[in-house]
Image: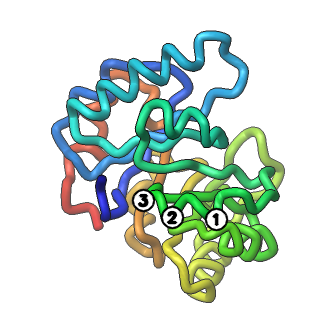
Amino acid sequence: MHKYLPNFFIFLDQYNSEIFKNKNINIGIIYRNYKDRKRESQLVKIAKACKKNRFQLFVSNDVKLVHKVKADGIYVPSFNKTKNFSNLEKKNIIILGSAHNQKEIHRKISQNCRAIFLSPLFYVKKSKSFLGLHKFNYLSYVNKINILALGGITENNIRKLKLLYIKGFGGIRIFKKKPAFKRPVFIKNNFF
C-alpha cells in the first residue's frame, strides 16, 4: 500500500488507454462515474491498468467498490456530508475530499480527509464563480491540510500553479485531449 500522496490526479469516468502510456508514477487516478451501468467493469479495467503502471487508484463515494478492487483510497465529493469514512484510515485507505469554500473544507477535515481538492480555481463553464489565485491561496494557507487545485486548469494557465500554496493538482478536461500522455503536465516530473 502506498504511503505517499501523488502530486497529479486525473479524474476519469471511463477507461482511457492514452492516460496509462505515461511513465510518471506520481499520478493518482480518481474514478468518478455514478451513472454508468458498466461502472464496475470499467473500474476493474482501470484498476488493472493502475496496478500495472503503479498509479494510485481512488474510487469516488463508494466504499464497497474501494474494497472490491483494492483501491488505494476513496474520493469524497463536496456533496457528501456523512462521516462514515472516518474508520477507513485504520484500514490503510487514503481519504481525499473536495470543497468549494471554508465551510466545506472544515467538513472534509472532520471526515478525516488527508487532502482536499479546492475548486474551481479558474473559470469553468458550469460554475458562475471561481476562487481565483488570491482567494485560493488564502484558503489553502489558512487551513493546515494538504490542498490540491482543481477546476479550469488548462495548458495556458498551468504555470500559475507554481504561485499557489498546494500539494498538487487534479484535472478533468486537460487530460481528455489526445494524446494525453504528451501534455506538459506529464512531461515534467519535477513540477512541484
Spatial separation of the CA atoms under disc 1 and disc 2: 7 Å
Answer whether labels 2 and 3 touch (C-beta < 8 Å). yes
The residue shown at (58%, 78%) is 140
In this view, 154 is above or below 164? above
SS class of the residue under badge 1?
helix
> Could you say where residue 180 lies in the image, as x and y percent from the top left?
33, 29
Q: How many marks?
A: 3
Residue 89 numbered mark, or none: 2
Amino acid type at circle 3 is Asn
Residue 92 numbered mark, or none: 3
Amino acid type at circle 2 is Glu
Answer whether labels 1 and 2 touch (C-beta < 8 Å). yes
Spatial separation of the CA atoms under disc 2 and disc 3: 5 Å
Residue 60 found in image quarter: top right
SS class of the residue under badge 3?
loop
The first of marks 1 and 3 along the sequence is 1
The residue shown at (27%, 32%) is 181
Q: Nearer the viewer, residue 175 or 52?
A: 52
> Could you say where residue 21 lies in the image, as x and y percent from the top left?
22, 27
Q: Is residue 30 visible?
A: yes
Question: 125 left or right of 57?
Answer: right
SS class of the residue under badge 2?
helix
> Could you say where residue 87 lies in the image, as x and y percent from the top left?
60, 63
In this view, 87 is above or below 106? above
Amino acid type at circle 1 is Ser
Residue that label 1 marks: 86
Picture quarter with the C terminus:
bottom left
- Label 1: how many residues lie within 10 Å, few (<14), some (14-19) or many (20+)? few
The residue shown at (47%, 78%) is 165
Question: 12 left or right of 185?
Answer: right
Q: How is the image coloured?
A: rainbow
Answer whether labels 1 and 3 touch (C-beta < 8 Å). no
